Structure formats: structure tokens, C-alpha cells
Image (cartoon, rainbow, N blue to C red):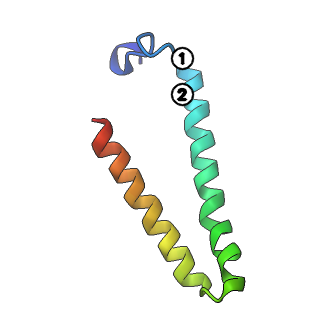
Amino acid sequence: MEKLFKLQIYHTTFSREILSGLTTFLTLSYILFDNPLIMSPGGTPIEGAFAATFLARAFCTVLLVVTAT
């Protein structure tokens, strides 16, 4: 893993990267389901808010991957 990701150059460890990836995944999963519930009292349909949140999340993920390489 060290050769592939050059962990020492970035002063990190494999376990730290796994923990940060898991934290990011859980945070985004929470937002995906919580955001529509927050927006629905304002009149936004839950299905539309869910779709918009999902699409924004997917777009930002792709943007991050493209700009990081």
C-alpha cells in the first residue's frame, strides 16, 4: 500500500486513511437521508430533495476525483 499511495510522503497511515474514508462515507450517507427531511417542511417534495441531494453528492464526488488526479 505504501508504494501505491505514497503514504509516508503525505505523513499518514493506512489505518488513518481507512478511518477518514469511513467517516466521510457515513457523513455523506447521513446527509443523503437527513437533508430531504430538513427541506420537506418548507414545501420541497421529499423525493425531489432526495434526488437533488444525491445528484449534488455524485457531481461533487466526480469533480473531486477529476481534480485530484
Within 10 Å of disc 2 (Cα), the crowding (few <14, some 14-19, many 20+) is few
x, y percent for residue 29:
61, 57
Instruction: Please name whichever residue, 29 or 60, is drawn nearer the observer in this view of the structure.
Output: 60
- Quadrant in the rendering for residue 22: top right
Quadrant, the C terminus: top left
Q: From the viewer's perspective, is 42 left or right of 11?
A: right
x, y percent for residue 24:
58, 44
Image height of 58 relative to 46, above or below: above
Q: From the viewer's perspective, is 25 left or right of 55?
A: right
Whole-angstrom CA distance, mark 1 to mark 2, is: 6 Å
Q: Which residue is mark 1?
A: 13
Image height of 69 relative to 13, above or below: below
Within 10 Å of disc 1 (Cα), the crowding (few <14, some 14-19, many 20+) is few
Image height of 45 relative to 66, above or below: below
Instruction: Please name whichever residue, 8 or 18, is drawn nearer the observer in this view of the structure.
Output: 8
Instruction: Please name whichever residue, 2 or 38, is drawn nearer the observer in this view of the structure.
Output: 38
Which amino acid type is shown beneath numbered disc 1?
Thr
Q: From the viewer's perspective, is 20 left or right of 9?
A: right
Q: Which mark is residue 63?
A: none
At x 52%, y 68%, the residue is: 53
x, y percent for residue 1:
41, 18
Kindly state the secondary structure of the residue where label 1 is placed: loop
Q: Which residue is mark 2?
A: 17
Kindly state the secondary structure of the residue where label 2 is placed: helix
Which amino acid type is shown beneath numbered disc 2?
Glu
